[in-house]
């Protein structure tokens, strides 16, 4: 039996991330729904600390998530994060109000603490932490003192020394909070909890529980060649033996250039069983004439199911076979996997039909509790080749989520409509592009326009920081891009969004641009300097040249929950842009300089 910390999940994207951070400190963390555990649950002497997670709701809304506030009187140290911080203060008599627009913060903020609170032990007086909130604590709960603030948030950290209650507005669990893990470590010290949990131990315990769960059934697993499904495949093949695990690789027609050959070879080299299915016509056929991002995801997910059914039909598999998926934790949480979470987007492993199978117990997801970095650690532990384990992650729906579509033709001359393009008229340092992409702010999905920066700046850190400021300030945009180069002449006179769905020609166009990016990263030896590098195609044309724009989205991250712009050398972008623009169907190339939040990593 391990001593542990309980995380009450108020429904943000962060409860499991907090758990993985705590596990990295070798402490067992358990996640529970706040209304499903009562006071008696907390009387377990193995519980040494309680963390209240962030969440998308406002504590003052009727019916918003809550827990039994008597747990604050048990003498167990409590750390409230974001929503948890607001809930804790409100529960003890404080007040929470909506932040004014200028008080809402998304992304990096510099936090200064007063040096008294043990939560900030060994943390510099001023350092960057990650913020994502619309509300703020305006009056502290009874017995609380403030101990840290940012420019826009006065009560960024508060504590009640006698009761060992702590509240923080920022997110220490995301990797971009530079001293976040130190803060969590400090909280664990305050809890005086044993540190005796490791990934090796998880692996051991997990093998036993998977064996029990699967019994003597056979497993079929769709492999994408990505880290997650490959590690899941290798894990199951190891536990059950290769003859009980059948891997299926679907060529969806939405793959990267040369991907099919790479995957076939890599999997065969592991000594596992793989069948390749050529289904490009079926996927592209089902996607023809579809423009809505969520609809596209759903179709791709359902087409995977169609393919699976067709396979089961011809291969006469019986009920002694379960389907396995390499789903990892963020895939489940962003679909609103827990009760209080808002849906940011539907993951292809979580479309309704698959969800039904999951509910019926027909799906095994051996990695569903892990984050990407933990999946990689597990892959290394199992002895998989380093190159395979450290491939950039690639989304299951493939290039399908990176080809933006539009159901109608819209044309804008520079004389723009006052309402939607008011920003430019106000002489702000950006213009608004007439298409939309998905983002995430304050745990909510957004679908807004990108701002196109008009500043001359080339320093990526400066551009990213400008982007954070602008997005915090202007609610119309959720990302900023900077033009890297174009095939049109002169200044922009007209901007067109063409009617476009997913088709062979567009896939080939994106494959080419994506291939240029990947090979140039390898040539310049910078592949491992970024965590992922989506290349996006948008039907955006300027001055009637070309049909599309390409957006480069280099990412620096550890777990995909938070991210900053991958800081590759400027020459890299110049080289890649020149090469991409040799295709005259490309009107312009942009660089996305937005962190996550407020932007997501993918564009939809
Ligand atoms: P976002 O766009 O949510 O992406 O910031 C986070 C990570 O998840 C990947 N991603 C997906 N992976 N199916 C997948 O298998 C999907 O539908 C999907 N959408 C996003 C994305 O590439 C990034 O690594």
Image (cartoon, helix red, strand yellow):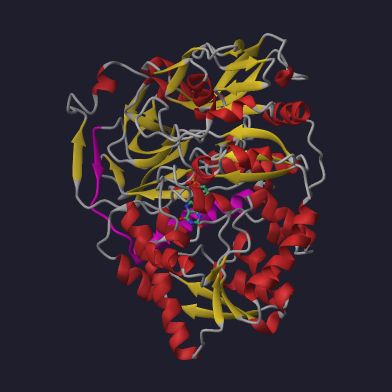
Is residue 103 visible in this depiction of the protein?
yes
Residue 115, picture quadrant: top right
In the rendered structure, the answer to whether residue 380 lies left or right of residue 18 reads right
- Where residue 205 appears, as percent x and y from the top left, is 75, 61
Count numbered badges in the picture: 0
Q: Residue at x 80, y 55 (%)?
A: 200
Q: Residue at x 38, y 25 (%)?
A: 60
By secondary structure, the bulk of the magenta-drawn segment is best described as helix
Q: Which residues are magenta?
A: 493-521
- Where residue 579 appears, as percent x and y from the top left, is 49, 49
Query: Which residue is at the front of the view, 75 or 390?
Result: 75
In the rendered structure, the answer to whether residue 196 lies left or right of residue 139 reads right
Direction front: furthest residue? 40
Say whether residue 517 is magenta.
yes
Q: Residue at x 54, y 23 (%)?
A: 169
Q: Is residue 386 above or below residue 143?
A: below
Query: Which residue is at the front of the view, 44 or 445?
Result: 44
- Where residue 89 appears, as percent x and y from the top left, is 52, 19
Residue 225, picture quadrant: bottom right
Is residue 178 visible in this depiction of the protein?
no
Q: Is residue 309 above or below residue 96?
A: below
In the rendered structure, the answer to whether residue 258 lies left or right of residue 112 reads left
Query: Which residue is at the front of the view, 379 or 265?
Result: 379
Q: Residue at x 79, y 64 (%)?
A: 383
- Where residue 504 appears, as percent x and y from the top left, is 36, 66
In the rendered structure, the answer to whether residue 418 lies left or right of residue 170 reads left
Q: Is residue 419 above or below residue 7?
A: above
Query: Which residue is at the front of the view, 147 or 241?
Result: 147
């Amino acid at each position: 039996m391990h001593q542990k910390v309980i995380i009450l999940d108020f429904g943000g994207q962060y409860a499991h991330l907090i758990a993985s951070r705590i596990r990295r400190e070798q402490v067992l963390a358990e996640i529970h729904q706040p209304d499903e555990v009562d006071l008696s649950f907390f009387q377990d002497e193995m519980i040494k600390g309680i963390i209240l997670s962030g969440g998308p709701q406002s504590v003052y809304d009727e019916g918003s998530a809550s827990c039994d506030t008597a747990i604050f009187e048990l003498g167990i140290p409590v750390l409230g994060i974001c929503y948890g911080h607001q809930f804790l203060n409100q529960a003890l008599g404080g007040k929470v109000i909506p932040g004014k627009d200028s008080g809402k913060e998304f992304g990096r903020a510099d936090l200064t603490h007063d040096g008294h609170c043990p939560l900030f032990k060994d943390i510099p007086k001023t350092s960057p932490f990650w913020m994502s909130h619309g509300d703020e604590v305006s009056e502290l709960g009874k017995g609380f003192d403030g101990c840290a603030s940012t420019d826009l948030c006065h009560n960024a950290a508060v504590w009640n020394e006698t009761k060992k209650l702590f509240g923080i507005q920022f997110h220490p669990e995301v990797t971009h909070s530079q001293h976040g893990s130190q803060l969590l470590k400090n909280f664990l010290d305050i809890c005086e909890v044993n540190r005796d949990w490791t990934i090796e131990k998880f692996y051991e315990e997990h093998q036993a529980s998977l064996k029990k769960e699967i019994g003597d059934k056979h497993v079929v697993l769709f492999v994408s060649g990505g880290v997650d499904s490959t590690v899941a495949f290798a894990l199951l093949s190891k536990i059950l033996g290769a003859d009980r695990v059948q891997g299926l690789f679907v060529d969806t027609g939405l793959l990267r250039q040369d991907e099919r050959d790479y995957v076939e070879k890599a999997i065969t080299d592991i000594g596992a069983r793989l069948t390749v299915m050529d289904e490009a016509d079926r996927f592209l056929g089902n996607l023809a004439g579809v423009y809505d991002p969520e609809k596209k995801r759903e179709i791709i997910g359902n087409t995977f199911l169609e393919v699976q059914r067709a396979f089961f039909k011809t291969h006469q598999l019986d009920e002694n076979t379960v389907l396995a998926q390499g789903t990892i934790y963020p895939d489940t949480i962003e679909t609103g996997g827990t009760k209080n979470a808002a849906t940011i987007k539907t993951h292809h492993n979580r479309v309704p039909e698959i969800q039904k199978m999951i509910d019926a117990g027909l799906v095994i997801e051996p990695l569903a509790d892990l984050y990407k970095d933990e999946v990689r650690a597990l892959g290394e532990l199992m002895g998989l080749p380093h190159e395979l384990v450290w491939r950039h992650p690639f989304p299951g729906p493939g290039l399908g989520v990176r080809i933006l579509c539009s159901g109608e033709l819209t044309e804008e001359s520079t004389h723009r409509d006052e309402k939607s393009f008011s920003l430019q008229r106000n002489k702000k340092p950006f213009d608004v592009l007439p298409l939309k992409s998905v983002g995430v702010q304050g745990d909510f999905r957004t679908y807004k326009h990108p701002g196109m920066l008009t500043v001359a700046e080339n320093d990526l850190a400066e551009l990213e920081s400008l982007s954070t400021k602008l997005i915090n300030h202007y609610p119309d945009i959720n990302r900023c891009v900077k033009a890297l180069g174009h095939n049109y002449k002169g200044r922009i006179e007209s901007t067109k969004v063409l009617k476009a769905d997913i088709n062979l020609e567009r896939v080939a166009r994106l494959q080419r641009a994506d291939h240029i990016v990947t090979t140039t990263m390898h040539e310049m030896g910078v592949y491992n300097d970024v965590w992922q590098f989506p290349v996006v195609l948008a039907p955006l044309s300027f001055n009637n040249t070309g049909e599309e724009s390409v957006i480069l989205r280099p990412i620096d991250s550890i777990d995909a929950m938070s991210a900053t712009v991958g800081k590759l050398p400027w020459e890299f972008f110049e080289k890649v842009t020149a090469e991409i623009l040799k295709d005259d169907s490309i009107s312009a190339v942009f660089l996305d300089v937005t962190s996550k939040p407020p932007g997501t990593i993918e564009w939809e």
